[in-house]
Image (spheres, grey):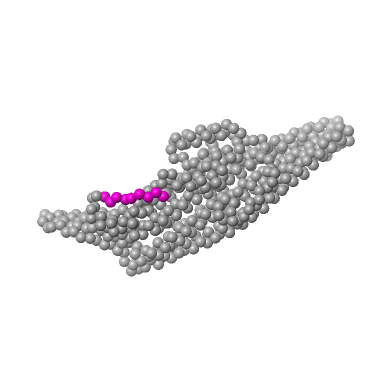
Amino acid sequence: MNKNTCRLPAAFPWLRPCAIAASSALLAGCASFSADGGFDKVAQLTKERTGQQVAMQRADSERQVAQGRVAELLAQPLTADAAVEIAFLNNRGLQARLGELGIAEADAVRAGRLPNPVFRFGRLSGGGSVEIERSVLFNVLGLLTLPVASEVGQRRFEQAQYQAALDAVGVANTVRRAYFDAVAAQELVRFHQQVKEAADASNELAKRMLQAGNFSKLTQMREQAFYADASAQLARAQHQATADRERLIRLLGLSGDPAIRLPERLPDLPKQPADPRDAERTALEKRLDVLLATRGTEAAARSLGLTMATRFINVLELGYQNKSETGVPRSDGYEIELELPLFDFGATRAARAEAIYMQSVNRTAEVAVNARSEVRESYSAYRTAYDLARHYRDEVVPLRKRISEENLLRYNGMLISVFELLADAREQVAGVTGYVQALRDFWVADTNLQTALTGGSPGASALAQPRTATGAVPSQAH
């Protein structure tokens, strides 16, 4: 955070000796706001983990530019990367979370500034005389502890930066999962429609053959039952597609009924699965929740040192005082205000600081243990999803296709009935549906793996990541 020098008001020349005596503290004691509000680091951390750069919109002009970019992206078929970019530009919940960065910077700047002096004024009159007392008190203890308090505030601000990046990465990963769910649901609707059409044809044909006396009532009812089941499955698939699409729209921050164009099919399966090296070490070094917890422990340790240093003296104020009375020369002097530790020797504050520190240590250890376990679990899910999708692509779907071709030849040779041909078509569509679901699960597992490696817990929802308890920024004694 940028620093600048404080100048003492000319109205209090008597403070100059105090300022000279504490020049080192004064030079470090007036923190100022940074030009970027600390957001450049957040944007960098986010881009390293998502490939997209998040932007915080502070003015109407920035929002107008963002809306123009959103309209440009929506004019094209939506991709996963484009969906993340739209969410970064348009998700109001994320923008609200990013706004907390400004609050954290304000707290950090306040922790790095000198406490305001206290001015006291009293006036008594009676019997033709007027007595006036004036005094200015300055927080000496706050001046002495200012460098440490400023450092603690800066560490709290760094925590807020990691939290903001964690929120953005969480939104990006949730948007990707919602995108793949929406594309897969839309694709599954088309296959359920094909099953419904085949069931409709089979049911109609069975009715006609029953009327002609060439079909039993039981066989016709079986075809009718399958038609009813296919109709119900299509209705469920259509609703699921609508629900997944609306969830994606909410995450993108779009209002009304936006015309988003999803691709007709999911991306193809990669030729080879990813094999991250030293995955657990990567998680401990790059995961934002681990870094956030580590910064919290460091800040708590520094805060504990400040509390222990000031446990016996909580308030120490030194000031200039004068008194004037009608007909009497003015009196000048000084005033010292010191809190006497008669009933509380600072043990409660020290115990509280120690408890916060140990709480932070244990939570950091928990986050590290969970991170390593979640990486192993996510990679297992990733490899399982990849192998299953490849099995459907290379074994199940080609086999169903060959069976369908053989049955078509048999039908043309009048060796099987049209009902057997339609039943085979239904089974072929079911095999393709299984492949679509397996492919969707792979891309979701791929997103979860990347989250577990560099972001946070894959199971945490967007904008609901657990925040690390850091305790309050230690205030300067006053």
* Rendered residue at 25%/55% (across/down): 16
- Extreme bottom residue here? 342
* Rendered residue at 23%/50% (across/down): 11
Q: Does the magenta portion include 87?
A: no
Judging depth in this view, the residue of 155 and 64 nearest the camera is 155
**As drawn, 286 above or below 435:** below
Looking at the rendering, which quadrant does residue 237 occupy?
Answer: top right
Which quarter of the figure is the C terminus placed in?
bottom left
Q: Is residue 89 left or right of residue 137?
A: right
Residue stretch in magenta: 1-9
* Rendered residue at 32%/50% (across/down): 6
* Rendered residue at 68%/47% (across/down): 273
> Majority secondary structure of the magenta segment?
loop
Find residue 12 and report its horizontal and vertical position in percent.
Answer: 24, 52
Q: How many marks on residues?
A: 0
**As drawn, 40 above or below 372:** above
Find residue 46 and report its horizontal and vertical position in percent.
Answer: 53, 46
Q: Is residue 61 visible?
A: yes
**As drawn, 214 above or below 269:** above
Judging depth in this view, the residue of 343 and 294 nearest the camera is 294
Q: Does the magenta portion include 2?
A: yes
Find residue 268 and report its horizontal and vertical position in percent.
Answer: 68, 40
**As drawn, 10 above or below 260:** below
Find residue 448 and report its horizontal and vertical position in percent.
Answer: 61, 49
